[in-house]
Amino acid sequence: MNGLTIMVIAIVVLSGAYLIYGRWLAKTWGIDPKAKTPAYELEDGVDYVPADTNVVFGHQFASIAGAGPITGPIQAAVFGWLPVLLWILVGGVFFGAVQDFAAMYASVKNKGRTIGYIIEEYIGKTGKKLFLLFCWLFCILVVAAFADVVAGTFNGFQTAADGAVSLIPANGSVATTSMIFIAEAVALGFILRYGGLGKWVNTAIALVMLVGAIVLGLMFPMYVGLSTWHLLVFIYVLIASVAPIWALLQPRDYLNSYLLIAMIVAAVIGVLVAQPAVNLPAFGGFTAGGQTLFPFLFVTIACGAVSGFHSLVSSGTASKQIKNERNMLPVSFGAMLMESMLAVIALIAVASFASTAEAASLGYTTPTQIFAGGVAGFLTSVGLPQDVVYTLINLAVSAFALTSLDSVARVGRLSFQELFLDESIDDENMGAVRRVLTDKYFATIITLALAYMLAKAGYASIWPLFGSSNQLLSALAFLACAVFLKRTGRRSFMLWIPLFAMIAVTFSALAITIWNLGSGIAVGTYQWVSGMTVTVNGASVLTAWGAGLQLIFAVLILALGVVVVIQGVRKLVAKTA
């Protein structure tokens, strides 16, 4: 098998899915181009802000396409390239894209409200409260994990086995460019909001800013240590999650979307020219790397096929920016299919190596490094220097990890606020305690404080739970949207198979994870789903604390998921009055 063949198959399948299946869904559910969208109806200059299609697409794509579609397929490649490819394509089309579109559609038809409010309206208040608590716990996990990952990609120093400290130029360049991105995003936000310029002029300005930031980053790398970056990243997230969406989130995502699209286009060109051989076996067995194909293939490959986090972005932030209902299909369905294409490229990149040992011999040990090294190798076929391309690809992936980080922090803040809001009580009659709990600054600080403590314990102590809880969130999103469609007289049968498939996958994965964690605590050794072993002793208090907290989170998330699923399924199968 050739990498070019895999890519052509993926392009044909994903393009056909958008043109045929996506348009059929839009026609089946109903799109009203003349309807006044929530972005106009409830415009507040903070969360509800009308934006052009390309701007909202940039926000959606940048928010959902972090390191997930790269990391997942590379980790799952131990099962062979064929099951990975099949799940990316089948999952991306019939699971992920449908979920993202359904979540955005349901939100726009309900005044831009989140999946939590949709559950309250069509399933019940108790279901909403439990779902919001689930979302908040999930967001804490994601913020902690991504913050630690981002800080690691910015870390300018590495320590060798002999204690010698050296600089990491690629990380330094990534850090500088990312900081410049943030400053440029604020400037671009004011230009987009008050400049009154045309779409193409704004695009040209954004591209100039993007190129300038990259050039300056390569010329002036910033060398700062890991612990300092931990603090700086959380300070940035604190500001980004409460700032008006037009001032930072929209323009920053707009800038970053061009960077990621350029990376995807460059990777496609590299595959076309290099036509890399696929050196991994087509099928690695039903058990590989200490994991079973079911359920862990479907949990490991999350964002590239289906991800519950996407439903939070589609219904939590992007739906509040849609100017016309026609824009929902390209923004949600289209962005998900493009992310699946990125996952396919990641699969081709890792498959170009004979094994992870070969990749490690070249200095590529993490999934991001394997992806960047593989794509850089492809692009040498068109005459580009590998070291520069390798740095640029690392830059793109790191920039999007930061994008996902502050998006999920905002969603976590909104979930916490909604948990204590009551529409029957207006602001004037709200008690002092409720007023504090629903304050956006308090909600942000308590969310980030818990995430910071987890991040300091190390993302490895919580990462194994991320995949399972993420996919369970997807099942809950399918359930909420299916009930909404049924209760409003729209067809929902296309959500039923994804719904029950994800319930089976996630409940199985969480049960196994809880069993492994409980067994690890009993014997004092922790065998993570990811395959990393951590032995607890007197010198690893943070690791042991993180393991115990992970177990608590796992049990809570599974319990909350079970209750919400039972309530939702009852509504789904009940006869419509």
Image (cartoon, grey):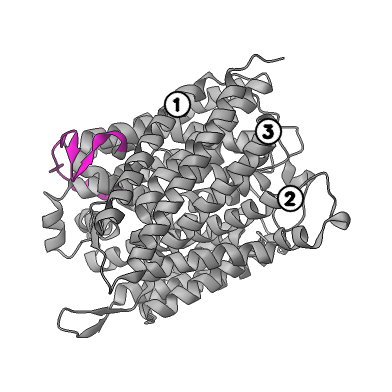
Could you tell me how far apart the alpha carbons at marks 3 and 2 are, in whole angstroms? 15 Å
Q: Quadrant of residue 205?
A: bottom right
From the viewer's side, name the closer residue of 411 and 41. Answer: 411
Instruction: Determine the residue positioned at 29% across, 45% down.
Output: 73
Q: Which range is magenta?
A: 268-295
Labels 2 and 1: the sequence-earlier one: 2
Task: Evaluate if marks 2 and 1 touch, with contact meaning CB atoms under 8 Å apart.
Answer: no
Instruction: Determine the residue positioned at 64% across, 34% down.
Output: 106
- The residue identified by callout 1 is 500
Labels 3 and 1: the sequence-earlier one: 3
Q: Residues within 10 Å of mark 1 (few under 14, many from 20)?
A: some
Q: Nearer the viewer, mark 3 or mark 1?
A: 3
Q: Would residue 355 be visible to someone looking at this image? A: yes
Q: Is 290 colored magenta in this rendering?
A: yes
Residue at the extreme front of the image, as rendered:
522
Q: Secondary structure at mark 1?
A: helix
Could you tell me how far apart the alpha carbons at marks 3 and 1 are, in whole angstroms? 20 Å
Q: Give the answer, above or below, for where 292 lies relative to 51.
A: above
Q: Which mark is residue 124?
A: 3
| Residue 537: x %, y % from top left | 25, 69
From the viewer's side, name the closer residue of 238 and 156. Answer: 238
- The residue identified by callout 2 is 421
| Residue 428: x %, y % from top left | 88, 57
